[in-house]
Amino acid sequence: MTSPGSLPRGIAANPRVSQWLTIHDDGTVHVFSGKVELGQGILTALGQVAADELGIAPHRVRVLPATTASGPDQGLTAGSMSIADSEALRVACAEARALFVQRAAAAFGAGADEVVVADGVLRDRDGTWKTSYWELAAGVDLDREIRGLASPRPVTGHAVVGTSAARVDLPDKLTGRPRFIHDLSLPGQLAGRVVRPPSPAARLLAFDPVPVERLPGVVAVVRDGDFLGVVAETETGAERAAAALRRACRWRQEDSLPPQESMRAVLRGAETETTVVRDDGAGPGTATAREGGAGSATAAAGDDELAEDEPASTATSRSATYTRGFIAHASIAPSCGAARWDEDGLTVWSHSQGIHPLRRAIARAAGIDVATVTVHHVEGAGAYGHNGADDAAYDAVLLARAVPGRPVHVVWSRADELTWSPMGSAMVADVGADLAPDGRLLSWTYDVWSYGHTARPGYAGSPGLLAAAHTERPHPLPPSADPVLAGGGGTARNAVPLYVIPRRAIRAHRVLTTPIRTSALRTLGAYLNVFAIESFIDELAAAAGRDALEYRLAHLTDPRAREVVERAALAAGWPGRPGPPGEDGVACGIGFARYKDSGAYCAVVAEVEAVRDVRVRRLTIAVDVGRVVNPDGVANQIEGGAVQSVSWTLKERVRFDRTRITSDDWESYPILRFTEVPEVVVEVIDRPDEPSVGAGEAAQGPTAAAVGNAVAAAVGVRVRDLPITAERIVAAMDD
């Protein structure tokens, strides 16, 4: 029995068994979850958890798409937290199992401890009597609070968790059956398109709707302040009308964006909120004190505070600066949403990662009672954080208001997706260290600057929806913030190295204004922070004349950390090649991190070829996510994260001038092509006795570092500014 005080947090917010599951007399169980399918396979994994706790075969479980009409409110599907949060479902299923066992025991005059459950059949130990969930379903009331009647099964009782159960979402995707929100076809559905301003600060001066309204199939032309859109009978008609509407507008534009070529200075010079992440007395900040030398590793003797047992005259100090530009979500499919207003209220379909927060934000923006709003989740193609999904949903709401009773289906253009979705923030990090004569780390300073990493719907009391900021009575978009450090932080995420260092001073500086809209993109600040830390560790190892693998292990005491590093290196056949560039432009590099310093351990060895361009040939990865629910699912998540990281690291950077974002197609914002995807080998370490943590964001930082370190080994120069392009390698050579 689980004590009420130790129930998972998801239970406190959703305390009734019926919010999590229902059992039916046809031999099936419907499971409700607040977590949504983003392509990460969560519906499959949750079904495995439910099957084990209930004691039934997996094929009996239907994990239904999330909806605000029923099921638990579990906030966001984000931060690699869905598996960790599945403890709530586990407890709810254990409670349901206990209720059925009690009912069966009462019916047969037996003790509850005499009842055995096998695939939904309840019987006594010698088979004298038996019944089933399905026979008892009508008589067991699950609409009751969870009290912790039964503890979840021990690991030894798991039959489904820990196996590579087949993904329930893949058959539709592999056979092309409609499954995505873009495939949605509702009765009476109309097509909608929005005409965005040409730049973030643009204002609408005038437009003539008449020529657009006269086009065949146009149902409505909608204007609300600077928000403009059309509704038509067909997709083609909506596209044609949107193009005509765009030509009929006159806008006033102004410069509002920072100079892209000076982002280091922009970030460092802005007003910031500083958070001291760690302060073990490493001094005022090696790197900060040397901003004049930023951009290249420098060596100086003994000008920082040293370890008490280390003579100042014997120590060496080094520092370097690492940067990344803004990164777009760049999903394969652009954002999409649908909405219908009728006498029963407002119904919305969205691929949002947080349908309950979206519901509240829509109600606030539209000025209606939240109880009249229902949001259904439908899968989208590509979800990496706070992209345009929520915005597209509200576009549909505004357009559908003009045609009550009929649903309006809105699909963004590629250009809108790449220029109006929230971006992953540009960042700059200064890192410095003091080394003993043998290369041992004595102290570490780290300062990182960034715009905030979250501005999801509902943040800071604002709906946070793009169109709501453009209406006649606007709801402005507040500057982005960061999650609290206890929740993983944003700018400071993974800013603390896991290595043993006597003294550390680590600070995160969040810029308080946001000229380019930023919000959550996979890993938040961890991608740059891990890249910076792991690149610098390689630089320190090289300076000490030591192998990068050996140097890491010499500063790691956590046995789980050491194991992933050692296993990745062993599987890759770590070359142990310090110093000279690799032959023929081919070399290996290694990167390591524990996501959020509390989640999955992950180590990556990258093999790259750097001749004319950089090509990643192979990634060898070891990952430890604690107890593994679905090994194949974990491998899929790690592979996907690693491949995306290769794309970020070699290709992706948002481009802009002082007025507008200029990277608005696949030519100006290139991503990794399918032909460039490297071979990826993943070794999953199962630890059944450890809590499960997520895998979706564990690989991005270590992969970037491994690629950067491999490039440095291959060409003999260090590129510290992401992405690592041929132009930047040449520039680094010139330095």
Image: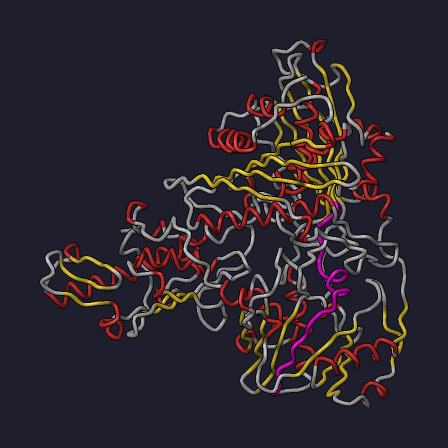
In the rendered image, residue 409 lying in the magenta stretch gets the answer: yes
- Compared to residue 371, the image places residue 489 above or below, namely above
Q: Is residue 288 visible?
A: no
- Quadrant assignment for the C terminus: top right
- Compared to residue 498, the image places residue 33 above or below, namely below
Nearer the observer, 714 or 37: 714
In the figure, is residue 82 to the left or right of 512? left
Q: Residue 212, how many percent across, how many down?
A: 82, 85
Chosen colour scheme: secondary structure
Nearer the observer, 239 or 303: 239
In the figure, is residue 100 to the left or right of 717? left
| Residue located farthest toward the front when viewing the structure as drawn | 584
- Compared to residue 512, the image places residue 168 above or below, namely below
- What residue do we see at 68% from left, 20% from top? 434
Nearer the observer, 528 or 735: 735
In the rendered image, residue 603 lying in the magenta stretch gets the answer: no
In the figure, is residue 208 to the left or right of 622? right
Q: Residue 680, how many percent across, how many down?
A: 58, 43
Q: Is residue 151 visible?
A: yes
Which residues fall within the magenta stretch?
A: 405-426
